[in-house]
Image: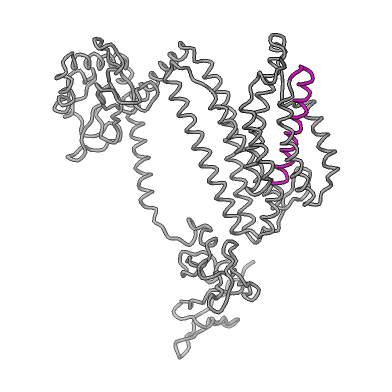
Amino acid sequence: MIEYVHVNWNPEADGQRGSWQNSACEISLPEGVYDGQLEQKDITKKHWKNSDSRPNCFIKSCRQKFSLIERPHHCRRCGEVFCSTCLKYQRKLNVLANPDPEGKPYKVCRTCFEEGRDSQGCVRSLSEEFKALKRSAKGQQLRQEYANTTSSWRDKLDIKQECQRLLMGFQKSIGTSEVMRTLQELRTVIATPDWQKSSLWMQENMSEVCQSCRTKFSLLKKKRHCKVCGVVLCKSCSYEELLIYLPDERDPEEITPQLGVIKFIGCPVVEPEICLLLHICCLCKEKLVDIQLSAVELSSKSKGASEFISKLLTVDGTTSDLQNKIVDQLKKYQEIIESLEDNTTRASSVIDEKGKHISNTKVLAKAQEDLSDYLAQYVLKVKLAKRLQPEAISDTQKILMKNYLRAKSEFYLDNIYTFRKMKAKLGDSAPAEVLDFIQRTVDRHAIVSSELYIRQLAFETIHMCDKYKLEESIPRLLTPVDEAIEGEAKACLLNDKEDWDLHLQHLHQMIQAQIKDHRLIRTSRRYLAQSGAMHAAEIMFRRSREILEQVHIQLAMKSANRSFPASKKALIEACEKAAKLDVKDVIKS
């Protein structure tokens, strides 16, 4: 039970201090209270690091040595010691050194400045964003109501018949005279021709608002008509994307106009010489795009493009899975970096599947290695997609391939930039021993993985050459690569004080298991029965080139630039020599 006591305010004679009194207790107010206001105290310094123990700037990339000229300065937020150049940021903090929009601006380091700056210690008005969202929601509601109320007349609209009306009217309007073709666009500006008016044409004087967003028309808000269905729209709700044109590559005597929605496959990439752009509404645009894409798909099938599309879809399925893995791994990598930057969780650990505790540093090294591996695999899969050759007679396939490769390249560039940015952020905040441990772990795993791949490939090629009586040009090509990787792998493991003999024993065991269950080179029984040694030579030659390229990309992306120079050089030389070889060089004469 809580007992409440009624007390009264009893002011003192000097008017500066007072007390709450009753017969049972007396509660005195602290110094500095006057008219209910508490005097502002200076920011706390209890968390400041001792400047005597910090002879250099805390930022690893700076490490400025302090002197009589360059004095040490404390970050008011984290308490670390920095030089004046690295402490040029300001942040609003309260007396407890926490971000507070109502606090005073104090000097902070870059890390503390960027920490939660979008939500803490900043004042920003969201009124405009709220109004924009409100207008968008209202417009969407009105469009939904309009769609429900106008479903009856739109169901009666025959969009194919309306498109045929536009094509016939355009054909008659341009005729065979060059003068008429030149004046066509000028005449449409003066007045709307009858062939551009649909059977459900809505008179301009009958509508005072846009039929999509319900905005009132005015001198500044002009009216637009959808040339397919005839509905009245404002400029924002109409799209000038319906192209009626005569193909440039045609018989000069032939006048057969065509219709398409620009920026979609099936429409000319370059604007034809004789063409006209018309306004359409959103609903008509969606229907026309569906019709256009269906026609393109049907045309591609008739030209025998199903094989190319199926191969592209197979490669795209793999790259899409890798994209999801890259995005998820980037989020995990960022979370671990943020946990290492937090002083309260720097020494914490996580629990793996076996119930063992693993430090955050080891988890970060594993996350960085996995992310580098996914990015390397993604590069290889995109290179495989580049080898797909579209049909020479199909311009649509060429445009599709060009746009596909552009999208994949943009995804890689965006994510590799984010990855490098997070690594730079980690380098600014993490201690040198943590960074060195992470890089040594990633380098060790990268060189051991490369050693496993090249050694297994060498064993399989030697076995195939002996079995199918082939020239040993591929095994001889792999020998210097294997020697270079083995030498640098041994140096790396011995530097980490690991047992080299035990490593070789485990390596041979893993290669035996891999050859038994997961071979790098697999032949086809059917093709062996048809071609014999030729098929074995072709598959060995192709897979050897692919694996050499794969190992080189993975080693280059995982390890540091200065690490394993001999192995990287040997891999590059092997890839160049393999590119000059031919399948006939592998088959004995």
In the image: residue 496, left or right of residue 236: right
Residue 524 visible, this orientation: yes
Q: Residue at x 64, y 46 (%)?
A: 368
Q: Main secondary structure of the magenta part?
A: helix
Q: Nearer the viewer, residue 231 or 456?
A: 456
Q: Residue at x 48, y 88 (%)?
A: 12
Q: Please determine whether, in this image, residue 356 is positioned above or below residue 345.
A: above
In the image: residue 404, left or right of residue 475: left
Residue 371 visible, this orientation: no
Q: Which region shows up in magenta?
A: 443-470
Q: Residue at x 73, y 29 (%)?
A: 476
Q: Residue at x 34, y 31 (%)?
A: 145
Query: Horizontal and vertical percent for residue 521?
Result: 71, 24
In the image: residue 276, left or right of residue 421: left
Split into 4 quadrants, where in the image is the N terminus?
bottom right
Q: Quadrant of residue 185?
A: top left
Q: Quadrant of residue 398?
A: top left
Query: Horizontal and vertical percent for residue 432?
Result: 66, 59
In the image: residue 77, left or right of residue 267: right
Q: Please determine whether, in this image, residue 311 is positioned above or below residue 381.
A: above
Q: Please determine whether, in this image, residue 42 is positioned above or below residue 249.
A: below
